[in-house]
Image (spheres, rainbow, N blue to C red):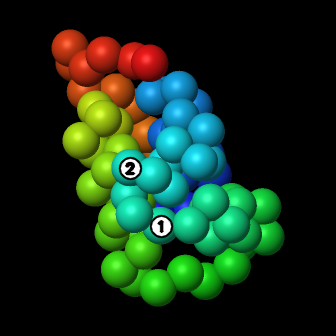
Amino acid sequence: MLTPLQLRAARVLVGWSRQDLAKNSGTSPDTVQGFENRGTDPKLSTLGKWRRALERAGVVFIDPDYDMGPGVRMRSGAKQK
C-alpha cells in the first residue's frame, strides 16, 4: 500500500521533485501529480516503480498498525540530495 501523502513525504525526504521521481522510476510527472494531488488510481506496477525508486534512494516505507498510520523514514546512513 502506498498513499499519496506517503509518496509526497518520501519525495521530500530525498529532495526529489515530481520530475525527479518520474525520471528515476520511468513514469510520467503528470501521473505522480495526479496521484499526489487528486488521489487518482495508478496501475499497481506504477506504484511499485515509485516505491522501488524511493527505496533505492534510502526511503523506508512504514505500514500502518493498530495505533499509527502509514509513514516514511530514511534508512540509516542514506544520503539526502
- In depth, the one of 51 and 29 nearer the eye is 29
Q: Amino acid at mark 2?
A: Asn
| SS category of the residue bearing label 2 | helix
Q: Which residue is mark 1?
A: 27
72 sits to left or right of 55: right
Q: Which mark is residue 78?
A: none
**Quarter of the image containing the N terminus?**
bottom left
Q: Report the residue at 28% width, 55% height from top.
A: 52
Q: Which residue is mark 2?
A: 24
Which of the 4 image quadrants contains residue 80? top left
Q: Report the residue at 61% width, 83% height from top.
A: 41
49 sits to left or right of 3: left
Q: Report the residue at 53% width, 34% height from top.
A: 16
64 sits to left or right of 4: left
Give percent across and percent down for residue 56: 24, 41
Question: Mark 2, residues whose alpha carbon is within 10 Å: few (<14), some, or many (≥20)?
Answer: some
Q: Report the residue at 62% width, 60% height from top.
A: 29
| SS category of the residue bearing label 1 | loop
- In depth, the one of 39 and 68 nearer the eye is 39
Give percent across and percent down for residue 31: 62, 70
- In depth, the one of 71 and 30 nearer the eye is 30
**Quarter of the image containing the C terminus?**
top left
Q: Is residue 65 above or below residue 27?
A: above
